[in-house]
Amino acid sequence: MSTGKKITGTVLGAAIAGVLIGSAALVPFTDDARATEAGRQSDVVLGESKDAIPSRTASDWVSYGDQAAVVHVAAEHEGVADSEEIAAGEGYLSRTIDLEVKERVWSRSGATALPDTLSIIADGWEFKDEGKLRVSSQDTSRMEVGHDYLVSFAHFSDGEWSTLGTGAILPYENSEVGQGEYQGSTVTASAYRSTMASRLVSGVAEPLTYQAAGKTAAGVKALLTSATPDATAAQNYALDAVARARLVAKAAAAAAAAADTFCRVAAPLATDADSRYTASELADVLGDLAGMSEAADSTILRAYAAQLHTGDDSNWTASTIRKTAATRIARACTIDVGDLLPNDTGDAE
């Protein structure tokens, strides 16, 4: 356990005199309203956080997390401000919290075992003169002493443990996700779920905070067990979460670049490009596209290119392979390629 200075109570000075403790209801504020509401209703300053590791979805948890567990925050320890902050009379105080594992929920195969007790870094305090405000990342729990949470943990190459990210800390009391502390205030599971629902984005994978709201630890385990990890992350489980995330980002960038190149080559096939191409020219383009495609799409594109090279236009018109090839290109690049037939008779004898 940490041996740092232990906090024995909330210290509020003149800078926060008269500020009320936050209400239990969760309200989805706009970014501009968040600071105003936080300043008026509680002693919590909400700040933006940029996670180094994805932690929003169940897939993120099983791609980068090593262990998931229900933990109890037993104690907290205040860090020391640096000399410049002390001289200025304002700055940031770090915080270390001591956790006790109450229930082991999920474990990645081959992962380092989570100890029964551990200490991790959490959001701390902002101080000015004699006053001190709690700091909490937006849209997550601060992890307060006396509260329980269901957390996804990552074990790093230096031997340290940490939460996976802001999306990996779920309030969990009375055996229900969403009940407990969130953004420094006590909330109900129904209010928590309503807030998570209000932030859903059409076409974007649902976050685990929403999917898990109202569930027991067993329900969360079921979500994680059924989740599919990122393929690149799964191939690199021997590395820690940060290294895995970097490789996934690199693979995604390479895939995006490949898709961009594929669509640049395919662009002249769009009906609105008004391009003219013979059977041989179209076959050559399809061959190039096949070389940039996954196995299944590559097979389709090469098969249609081979039909074009035969010079038998009766095969082209009736070809189901042609129709499939057109669908694959249109879907990959969101362009209309029409019937994907030669439109220049330069090959004709």
Image (spheres, grey):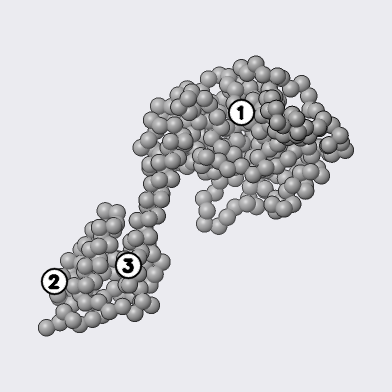
Residue 203 shows in this picture:
yes
Name the residue tied to disc 2: 310
Q: Earlier in the sequence, mark 1 or mark 2?
A: 1
Q: Secondary structure at mark 1?
A: strand
What residue is shown at x 69% (from left), y 25% (from top)?
A: 80
Where residue 119 sits, quadrant-wise, is top right
Figure label count: 3
Q: Is residue 193 left or right of residue 55?
A: right
Name the amino acid type tagged 1: Ile
Q: Mark 1 or 2, which is nearer the eye?
A: 1
What residue is shown at x 72% (from left), y 32% (from top)?
A: 85
Q: Quadrant of the N terminus?
A: top right
Where residue 326 sits, quadrant-wise, is bottom left
Mark-to-mark CA distance, 1 and 2: 67 Å
Q: Is residue 231 left or right of residue 41?
A: left
Graded by Cα atoms within 10 Å as few (under 14), some (14 to 19) or many (20 or more), the crowding at tag 1 reads: some
Q: Position of residue 325 (x, y in %)?
A: 29, 66
Name the residue tied to disc 1: 121
Q: Position of residue 55 (x, y in %)?
A: 53, 40
Graded by Cα atoms within 10 Å as few (under 14), some (14 to 19) or many (20 or more), the crowding at tag 2 reads: few
Graded by Cα atoms within 10 Å as few (under 14), some (14 to 19) or many (20 or more), the crowding at tag 3 reads: many
Q: Mark 3 or 2, which is nearer the eye?
A: 3
Asked whether the beta carbons under mark 1 and mark 3 sit within 8 Å of each other, the answer is no
Name the amino acid type tagged 2: Thr
Name the amino acid type tagged 3: Ala
Q: Earlier in the sequence, mark 3 or mark 2?
A: 3
